[in-house]
């Protein structure tokens, strides 16, 4: 299984002939190496309804007949736009043909701001556990630190975790390092940093806070084999 990082919070999983994209914010993402017309996901998983995570979901899903997995409110909203969806909610898991997906808590917001200054509520934010061929990947989404991360790690041994470090909107490096300890993940990759001025961080400083060999900074397009 090949797991790659593509700037901001974009993660791609390639396994068993399937391509799975998490939070495909591509257009407007100055840190990504991806182009909307070049990527052909079979599955898109969304952590929450903010624009820098939903990103190009509708275009990608329509162009590739992708299945979009998200919380019930967000998946319903996207289905109204002609997208094929599977709604879930926090604590729930489902076995798909490519593997198992479970949504976990995340402490953040989730909504879409319209041009006429209205906010559309798009359900609770979530983290995502993806288990394929006995390997589990945890994408925390946008979240602050919370103690139940220890329960997540205890219940679901994590091979690879993607944790936000940008601060301001999510955990900063110090809280994310503490979260990594609670989760007990074998490998940890920082995400959600340096895309915008308020979330500018040094990812190497975050890695230095972790036990030797646990943290790894991935440049956009770099991957890890599980």
Image: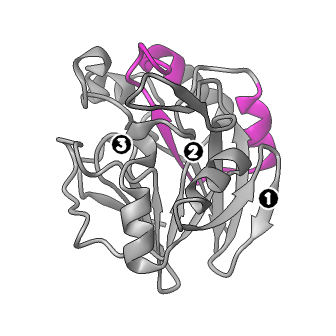
Residue 42 lies left or right of residue 35; in this view the side is: right
- Compared with 47, 145 (above or below) is above
SS state under label 2: loop
Instruction: Identify the mark nearer the N-term, 3 or 1.
Output: 1
Residue closest to the eye, 73 or 197: 73
Q: Nearer the viewer, mark 3 or mark 1?
A: 1
* Res 112 visible: yes
Query: As drawn, is 98 to the left or to the right of 225?
Result: right
Q: Position of residue 30 (x, y in %)?
A: 17, 41
Name the residue: 59% across, 24% down. Answer: 108
- The CA distance from mark 3 to mark 1 is 28 Å
Which residue is located at x 24 percent, y 58 percent? Answer: 221
**Magenta-highlighted residues:** 148-176
The residue carrying mark 1 is: 93
Q: Is residue 18 left or right of residue 79?
A: left
| Element on which disc 1 rests | strand
Which numbered marker is on residue 216? 3
Mark 3 neighbour class, 10 Å CA radius: few under 14, some 14 to 19, many 20 or more: some
Examine the rendering and report whether any part of residue 2 can be seen.
no
Q: Is residue 61 magenta?
A: no
């Amino acid at each position: 299984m090949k797991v790659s990082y593509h700037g901001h919070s974009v993660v791609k999983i390639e396994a068993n002939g399937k391509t799975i994209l998490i939070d495909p914010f591509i257009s407007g993402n100055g840190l990504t190496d991806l182009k909307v017309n070049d990527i052909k996901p079979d599955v898109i998983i969304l952590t929450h309804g903010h624009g820098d995570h939903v990103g190009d979901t509708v275009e990608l899903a329509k162009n590739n007949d992708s299945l979009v997995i998200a919380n019930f409110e967000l998946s319903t909203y996207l289905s109204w736009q002609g997208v094929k969806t599977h709604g879930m909610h926090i604590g729930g898991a489902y076995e798909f043909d490519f593997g198992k997906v479970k949504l976990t808590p995340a402490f953040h917001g989730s909504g879409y701001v319209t041009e006429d200054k209205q906010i559309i509520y798009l359900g609770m934010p979530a983290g995502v556990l993806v288990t394929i061929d006995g390997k589990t990947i945890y994408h925390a989404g946008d979240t602050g630190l919370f103690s139940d991360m220890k329960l997540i790690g205890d219940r679901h041994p994590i091979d690879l975790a993607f944790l936000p470090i940008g601060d301001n909107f999510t955990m900063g490096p110090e809280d994310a390092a503490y979260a990594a300890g609670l989760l007990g993940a074998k490998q940890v990759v920082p995400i959600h940093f340096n895309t915008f001025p308020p979330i500018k961080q040094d990812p190497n400083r975050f890695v230095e806070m972790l036990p030797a060999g646990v943290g790894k900074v991935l440049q956009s397009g770099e991957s890890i084999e599980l």
